[in-house]
Amino acid sequence: MQYDITEAIGLAKKVAIAKFDETIEAHIRTGCDGRHAEQQIRGAVVLPHGTGKTVKVLVFAKGEKVDEAQAAGADHVGGEELIPKIQNDGWLDFDVVVATPDMMGVVGRLGRVLGPKGLMPNPKAGTVTMDVTKAINDIKAGKIEYRLDKTNIIHVPIGKASFTEEQLADNFQTLMDAIIKAKPSALKGQYLKSVTLAPTMGPGVKINTAKLV
């Protein structure tokens, strides 16, 4: 059974009955083949109503950029000295990592730890930048990153079950606009194979993709 977006959001809110405020996630199955670079999808978008969760930001910077990052509200700022803490002590008290380009040599040494967790800064996601203030503001305002996983599905939060249906619909539409725009020109055949909304603990609700494109 497939629903239009308004019905799907209403249902996803209804099936979120856990004792905590569940996150509503969109799972977008694409027709892309991520093994081909030209069919990779990766980017970021700021959700108008945020994700409902407080995001901790770690910034790798040096010089005056350290002060700038602190002033912009970064939760942690540092450089070389953070490497052993992350590598050896397993410190991962952050959700997003931002780095200035001149720090990527340092951050690269953490590739084995940060890479598998999806925490490596990336220019396409706006997390490798000299404008650390904008990067931090966007992330704190509800910027999310989307990209294909190994099975060519994109998983992203669009808010919490406590959000109003309008807020979830706005967030979902903003996300879908970005993803539809990101369609690789090299792709032949169907782009959006299925789109499902699901709360953390509840069942998924399928959306009629024909109405999205």
Image: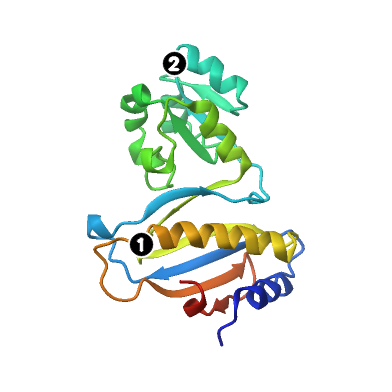
- Quarter residue 110 falls in: top left
Residue 115 vs residue 102, the one in the foreground: 102
Judging from the image, what secondary structure is the residue with disc 1 in? Answer: loop
Does residue 131 lie above or below 156 as drawn?
above
- Which quadrant is the C terminus positioned in? bottom left
Asked if one can make out residue 166 in the rendered structure from this viewpoint, the answer is yes
Cα separation between marks 2 and 1: 37 Å
Q: Position of residue 21 (x, y in %)?
A: 73, 59
Residue 32 vs residue 112, the one in the foreground: 32
Q: Which residue is mark 2?
A: 62
**Residue at horizontal 58 percent and vertical 28 percent from the top:** 74
Tell me the kind of residue under disc 2.
Lys
Q: Position of residue 97 (x, y in %)?
A: 48, 35
**Residue at horizontal 68 percent and vertical 76 percent from the top:** 11
Drawn side of residue 129 relative to residue 170, left or right: left
Q: Residue farthest to the top? A: 63
Drawn side of residue 2 relative to residue 12, left or right: left
Does residue 150 lie above or below 80 as drawn?
below
Q: Position of residue 23 (x, y in %)?
A: 65, 59
Tell me the kind of residue under disc 1.
Lys
Q: Which residue is mark 1?
A: 183
Q: Position of residue 118 (x, y in %)?
A: 42, 47
**Residue mark closest to the camera, 2 vs 1:** 1
